[in-house]
Image: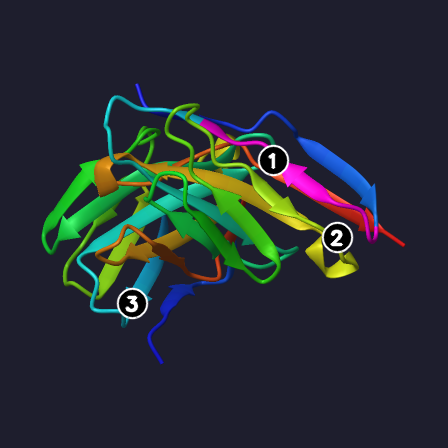
Amino acid sequence: EAAVTQSPRSKVAVTGGKVTLSCHQTNNHDYMYWYRQDTGHGLRLIHYSYVADSTEKGDIPDGYKASRPSQENFSLILELASLSQTAVYFCASRDNYAEQFFGPGTRLTVL
Amino acid sequence: GDSVTQTEGLVTLTEGLPVMLNCTYQTIYSNPFLFWYVQHLNESPRLLLKSFTDNKRTEHQGFHATLHKSSSSFHLQKSSAQLSDSALYYCALSPQGGRALIFGTGTTVSVSP
């Protein structure tokens, strides 16, 4: 069954440390996205990609990098994690009618 | 720029009563795609409804919405709320079916017996 999976599902990181969140999709979709969710802010777009080896900045890219090594995989990288990056992170892929399919989310806590 | 406005942050109601969640949008494009996503506690958002046809009602799982381009609205309605409808609801816009979805801030619905 086509799906979007994320790993890890939860992560505790230390301030200043490096964090990598991974996403894998079997939907055969070109577009993939990373969002963060915070209470009161809804879902905000961090980075997205429409083809392998290329990424684009979303609305809140500062402090985040992204990597798309293949159509199926899309990673979000926090080089120097900060307290303000504590949030739930969702990955999604998109079909040709703009519908997005979300992964289960990663709960990141930065201490 | 493109934006989505959901005016209610929290809606509380009793089971059996009707539900209406407001969604208005702004975009310069004439053919936007509008979506409603629902997110239950500790789950990820999933699609509830979508539309890109003006003045056509779309329905799913007892919910319905009609895209009105004249008023830039896509309100979500249900005639009788159920306990299982308690969730976070996002309205989202894809301008001209393009790059990414623009989400509203979400409306939390809490249904009590």
Mark 1 vs 3: CB contact within 8 A: no
From the top left corner, tell me how far across and down residue A49 is, in percent.
19, 47
Residue nearest the observer in this picture, A83 or B67: B67
Same chain shared by disc 1 and disc 2:
no
Q: Which residue is mark 3?
A: A25
What kind of residue is marked 3?
A: Gln
Residue nearest the observer in this picture, A78 or B71: B71
Q: Could you tell me which residue is drawn at 49 percent across and 39 percent down?
A: B91
Q: Indicate whether residue B21 is drawn in magenta.
A: yes
Using the numbered discs, state the Cα–Cα distance from disc 1 to disc 3 in whole angstroms.
26 Å
Q: Which residue is mark 2?
A: B81
Above or below — where is B28 with respect to A78?
above
* Image disc number at residue A6: none
Using the numbered discs, state the Cα–Cα distance from disc 2 to disc 3 in whole angstroms.
34 Å
From the top left corner, tell me how far across and down residue A43 is, in percent.
46, 39
Residue nearest the observer in this picture, B62 or A86: B62
